[in-house]
Amino acid sequence: MLLYLVMLLNVHIDDKYMGNKHLLHDLKVTISDNEKVGVVGRNGVGKTTLFNVLAGSDGEYEGAIDKKRGLRMIATRQEHHDIGKQSALDYILAHLPHYSELKLIIDTYPETMGDDMKKINTYSNALEKFGDLTYYDIEDRLLQALAKYQINEDKALMPMHRLSGGQKRFVELILVQYSLPDLALIDEPTNHMDYIAKDAFINWLEAAKHSCVIITHDRDVLARVDRIIEIKDKKAVSFKGNYESYLKQNASNTTNQLQNYEIALKTIENLKSQIAYAIARAPGYAGKSANNPFIVMRDRLQKQLKEVEDANPKPSFWIDQESAAALNPKTTANYDKFKSKNIKISRQTEGERATTLLTLLNAQLGYNNTPLFAPISHSLQTGERLHIIGRNGAGKTTLVRAIAETVRGTKPLTLLDGKIIPGNHVRINMYEQEMGDKLLDLTLYEAIESIYRDFDLPINQQHIMRSMGDYLFDPAIDAHILVRNLSGGQKARLQLIRMLINKPNLLILDEPTNHLDLPSIEELENALKTYHGAIIYISHDSYFARNIGGTELKIGE
């Protein structure tokens, strides 16, 4: 039996610029009914920009978008400046289809309709539709759903502006889940989620009866989608199936691209040789001459060269390391020559002797003399990995910050009981979820310079420019951008510069894969696998945890 897919959205973007940057060109995307689609791509290629175009919030592009008639589309919002003192619960209710108008009729008509048959019919129809939309118990169900993301009733009823950025993200997800859209556009949904909240989101995604298009590099989410769209070289490339299927198809496609690009380069080299030969055989003929066959030959070959060069720009090549290891030697050599530039993370602390770097002795932390978790005892040696897990709010970040403060010589105010004992000669650094205020109003150049100075390291322009290049910044373009205006991925890469700059032998990582693209996550994992120091990390990325390994320490309930 043939299955006919209903087209919801057909997109053709001829060109899209952001300032002077040409982001998208001849990009084509089609979304069908009941599809779960993951969108991936290197940081800065235009994924969020594409979402803004699809959602209608960015109309500055050349192209066309065809939508199914009556399409109900909803997109998660990044900003909430215009909602005043509206509570999270009221914010969601106000955006549910027909809820506000039906609720107004149900609440007000009984007092005014009397014997007016028109109003009685309107009221009766409103009651019926309210029931059909299952709105009679909607507030209770919304409160239960918010609770899964650790937004209790008190928080759900407080003004939205008092919620954290992560909590507002969860409110947006609940809004999507209950707004009955045909198509939901969701940007990085699992950043800041703990493992229980992430499981709840993935379960909802698999059960959803409508289409979802999700920007994400969370491999746990990509493992559950039907299709992956990669934004690459200004275009969209579609891969049927989930993350594992994407890796296999991408490896095959990239191998073919490598072969075609190599053939194109040989053709270009051959044409240039023929042009040089024609010029050499016609000395003195710098311009055109219809009577000289070598000038005619030169012009024909130059035209052909331009056509070949225009038709074969260098593609972005990336193959995951497992697939790359299976390539034949010739293809491997070509891949190593042409592959996309990735972040360069130096291997650290090789040759240091094993020693105890940290001891937790019945350590208990909390606020206002209220403990967050039961006392913890643990000893960490050189080369060991400690994976801290727990729900949001259990105290994971509080614990790692207290460890960092203690190692740096400050007694943490959150330490209620027990001891945190640093080892001799421990050098610590930390990757945090938030950048912090100190660097936000500096340019990228000034921020890197400030990081060097914070660690009393020698600094010059060459050091700064090299750091930018190693972490995929363009020194000519990015050096003067304020840190607060960097993308999430760019801020994450700046965090990596800061984390590794002093060659620490104890690393603390708080959700390091948030905002990183797939190649950068892989490079980080590779660096950490060969890192000789100790690592304490918080992560709800199951792929990352499997690759880094170590002892698991659960705190809280």
Image (spheres, helix red, strand yellow):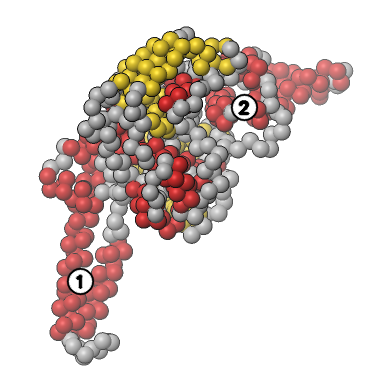
Residue 382, image x and y in percent?
Answer: 28, 24
Q: Position of residue 488 (x, y in %)?
A: 47, 40
Dot 2 and dot 1 residues touching (CB under 8 Å): no
Residue underneath mark 2: 163
Q: Is residue 147 left or right of residue 460?
A: right
Say what amino acid the circle numbered 2 marks.
Answer: Leu
Residue 81 found in image quarter: top right
Q: Residue at x 72, y 24 (%)?
A: 102
The image quadrant of residue 465 is bottom left
Report the residue at 26% width, 49% height from top. 339
Q: Nearer the viewer, residue 355 or 303?
A: 355
Observer able to see residue 175: no
Report x, y in % for residue 406: 45, 24
Q: Quadrant of the N terminus?
A: top left
- Give whichever of discs 2 and 1 has the lower sequence position: 2
**Mark 1 belongs to which amino acid?**
Lys
| Residue 69 or residue 29, whichever sits in front | 29
Looking at the picture, does residue 509 appear above or below residue 120? below
Q: Is residue 149 left or right of residue 301?
A: right
Observer-side mark, 2 or 1, equals 2
Q: Secondary structure beneath disc 2?
A: loop
Report the residue marked by disc 1: 272
Where does residue 369 sit, x and y in percent of width and height?
Answer: 58, 12
Tell me which residue sits at (29%, 69%) in the image: 306
| Circle 2 Cα neighbour tier, 10 Å, few/some/many (<14 / 14–19 / ≥20) | some
Query: Mark 2 and mark 1: span between their CA atoms?
Result: 63 Å
Q: Is residue 247 above or below residue 179?
A: below
SS category of the residue bearing label 1: helix
Work out whether 125 lies above or below 9.
Answer: above
Q: Residue at x 57, y 11 (%)?
A: 370
